[in-house]
Image (cartoon, rainbow, N blue to C red):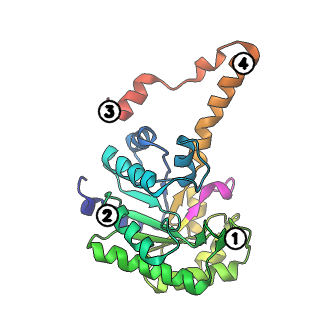
């Protein structure tokens, strides 16, 4: 699976799986290659996870940095890559379109666009959000590459707990051409089912917010694509914190007994 077209075709096919499937979120090329080696079929970037690798806050990564990151993940693996492209890194729609065109050129197979303005720190109005999603659809179509567009509403993450508004937004995003829909921070299987029962497009669910749910349960509630956002990044940071504290506070190295097997890691990295 080498060409962008081949990856896009494979990525689209994954979304027909009604049983649900996991798309994990690596934070760098090494983690991406490990996840690929384990057998995952596609990967998604995480804006927060990648920001961590640069020592930045989520939302502080520059357009140039994100484009370089996506290009590196595409070059470093054989898998379809879905890019978390925030609000297209632009308030102006024409600028957003130009940025999407540049992102498409990195070789990604999917692009997620959200309806939150990081400059204004607010959710775009429904009319402006729809206009932006439609412009993104047209920008992707102009590339001639069948990249999947995920339209994402940030309402729940930003404190607007109105499922009716979320459903309305997602329905309209689908109506103007979005391929996949996403509302991160749904916190229960019942809420997930309430939202997805009103939608016809594949739905991405952020699994860590629904604690204890399995892939089978998430799929039964309407989750097609199951991601984990920046959670894997922070899961990897936990043992680093523990090891650092142990060395500082106790002067010991018991954490060494829990390190990953270097032979296995090198095998997954194909080194």
Closer-to-camera residue (199/54): 54
Q: Toward which corner of the image does residue 252 lie, by quadrant? A: top right
- Which comes sooner in the sequence, label 3 or label 4? 4
**Residue 251 versus residue 7 in the image, above or below:** above
Q: Is residue 196 visible?
A: yes
Q: Toward which corner of the image does residue 240 lie, by quadrant? A: top right
Which class describes the residues within 10 Å of circle 4: few (<14), some (14-19), or many (20+)? Answer: few
Q: CA distance from mark 3 to mark 2?
A: 24 Å
- Which comes sooner in the sequence, label 1 or label 4? 1
Circle 1/circle 4 CB separation < 8 Å:
no
Looking at the image, which residue sits at the far left? 3
Q: CA distance from mark 1 to mark 4?
A: 45 Å
Q: Which residue is label 2 attached to?
A: 8
**Disc assigned to residue 270:** 3
Q: Which residue is label 1 attached to?
A: 190
Circle 1/circle 2 CB separation < 8 Å:
no
**Residue at the spot x=49%, y=84% of the render?**
131
Q: CA distance from mark 2 to mark 4?
A: 48 Å
Looking at the image, which residue sits at the far top? 251
- Which comes sooner in the sequence, label 3 or label 2? 2
Q: Secondary structure at mark 2?
A: helix
Circle 3/circle 4 CB separation < 8 Å:
no
Circle 3/circle 2 CB separation < 8 Å:
no
Looking at the image, which residue sits at the far right? 249
């Amino acid at each position: 699976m080498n060409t962008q077209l081949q990856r896009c075709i494979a990525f689209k096919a994954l979304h027909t799986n009604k049983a649900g499937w996991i798309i994990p979120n690596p934070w760098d090329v090494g983690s991406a290659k490990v996840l690929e080696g384990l057998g995952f079929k596609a990967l998604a970037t995480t804006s927060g996870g990648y920001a961590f690798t640069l020592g930045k806050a989520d939302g502080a990564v520059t357009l140039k940095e994100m484009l370089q990151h996506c290009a590196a993940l595409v070059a470093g693996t054989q898998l379809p890559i879905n890019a978390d492209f925030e609000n297209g890194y632009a308030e102006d729609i024409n600028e957003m379109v130009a940025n999407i065109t540049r992102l498409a050129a990195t070789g990604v197979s999917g692009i997620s666009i959200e309806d939150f303005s990081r400059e204004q720190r607010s959710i775009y109005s429904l009319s402006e959000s729809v206009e932006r999603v439609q412009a993104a659809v047209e920008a992707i179509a102009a590339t001639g590459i069948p990249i999947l567009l995920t339209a994402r509403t940030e309402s729940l993450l930003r404190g607007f707990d109105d499922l009716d508004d979320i459903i309305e937004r997602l329905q309209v995003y689908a109506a103007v051409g979005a391929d996949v829909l996403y509302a991160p921070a749904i916190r229960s299987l019942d809420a997930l089912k309430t939202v997805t029962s009103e939608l016809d497009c594949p739905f991405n669910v952020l699994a860590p917010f629904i604690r204890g749910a399995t892939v089978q349960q998430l799929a039964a509630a309407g989750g097609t694509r199951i991601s984990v956002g920046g959670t894997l990044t922070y899961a990897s940071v936990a043992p680093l914190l523990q090891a650092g504290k142990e060395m500082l506070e106790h002067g010991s190295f018991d954490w060494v007994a829990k390190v990953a097997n270097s032979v296995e890691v090198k095998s997954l990295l194909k080194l």
